Image: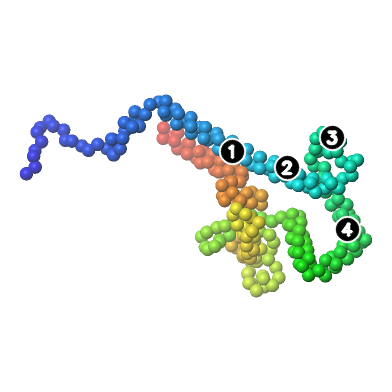
Amino acid sequence: MKKQKPDGEKPQTEPPLGEPFRHLITDTPPPMRRRARLIARLRSYFFTGLVIAAPISITIYVTWWFIGFIDNWFKPLIPARYNPDLYLPFSVPGIGLLLALFMLTVLGALAANLFGRTVVGYGEQLLNRMPVVRNLYSALKQIFETVISQSNSTFRDVALIEYPRRGIYAIAFVSTDTKGEILDKVGAEDGMVSVFLPTTPNPTSGFLLFVPKSDVRILDMTVEEGAKLVISAGLVTPERVKAAEAVAAEKRDKLVSPDTQSST
């Protein structure tokens, strides 16, 4: 038999969840809350300063190291009477770099005429007769020719392709239209394009894919913006995307505001 509660007595209800700990929140002294906010603000300032200073510092350090490395190689080639480090109380950075640029320019000018091409041809024939040296020379020559040719010609577009399976998209760079035997063997009716699928965070390595044009979605971002997106693993959003999102948000606000005004 359940005991009946006397009239006028209110039934006891269980305290809401978290009620026993409410005093820990409400009883927190204001100085502690201010201290926590101050620590959070200082932490935010620190990371903001780190994001600003780290790229600048690393860039300056690498540039300074490169100039010093070139100076150590080419400054000894400067005659004593023309070397400013011998009669100035301080070292002048960049003299060796200027000398290296001048020597490379003169070498390119000499190799551009008939006599220079003949000398270079005889030198290459001599190197090709050496068993180990010829492999090293041919590999280095191919690497530098590839780098120079890529610096003169960039990718055409940034696109999305479904990779590694349907429903998952990856950033790719469109290079050229696929031609020749590959297109003939595949037999794509609307044509194909050659795309480079980079890896993150190192976009210099990746895969060469031949994709039908119908499976390629061209994006509005530039190649530089696409490279930043790949290197940052999606953390750096192109500025035009941010502007488009802001415009879309503004349009949504304009569409919502008349409804809210009419309801009020």
Q: Amino acid at mark 2?
A: Trp
- Residue 177 in percent (x, y) is at 69, 63
Residue plotted at (76% across, 56% down): 148
Labels 2 and 3: the sequence-earlier one: 2
**10 Å crowding of disc 1: few (<14), some (14-19), many (20+):** few
Residue plotted at (51% across, 38% down): 254
Rounded to the nearest angstrom, the CA distance separating label 4 from label 2 is: 31 Å
Residue plotted at (45% across, 31% down): 36
Residue 90 picture quarter: top right
Give the number of the mark in front: 4 or 2: 2
- Residue 227 in percent (x, y) is at 64, 51
Give the number of the mark in front: 1 or 3: 3
Q: Amino acid at mark 4?
A: Ala
Nearer the observer, 27 or 189: 27
Nearer the observer, 174 or 120: 120
**Residue on which disc 1 sits:** 50
Nearer the observer, 198 or 175: 198
Mark 4, secondary structure of its residue: helix
**Left or right of 88, for residue 44:** left
- Is residue 220 among the parts visible in the rendering? no
Picture layout, residue 125 above or below residue 90:
below
Labels 4 and 2: the sequence-earlier one: 2
Q: Mark number for residue 64?
A: 2
Labels 1 and 3: the sequence-earlier one: 1
Q: Amino acid at mark 1?
A: Leu
Labels 4 and 1: the sequence-earlier one: 1
Mark 3, secondary structure of its residue: loop
- Residue 219 in percent (x, y) is at 61, 53
Q: Mark number for residue 111?
A: 4
**Residue on which disc 3 sits:** 88
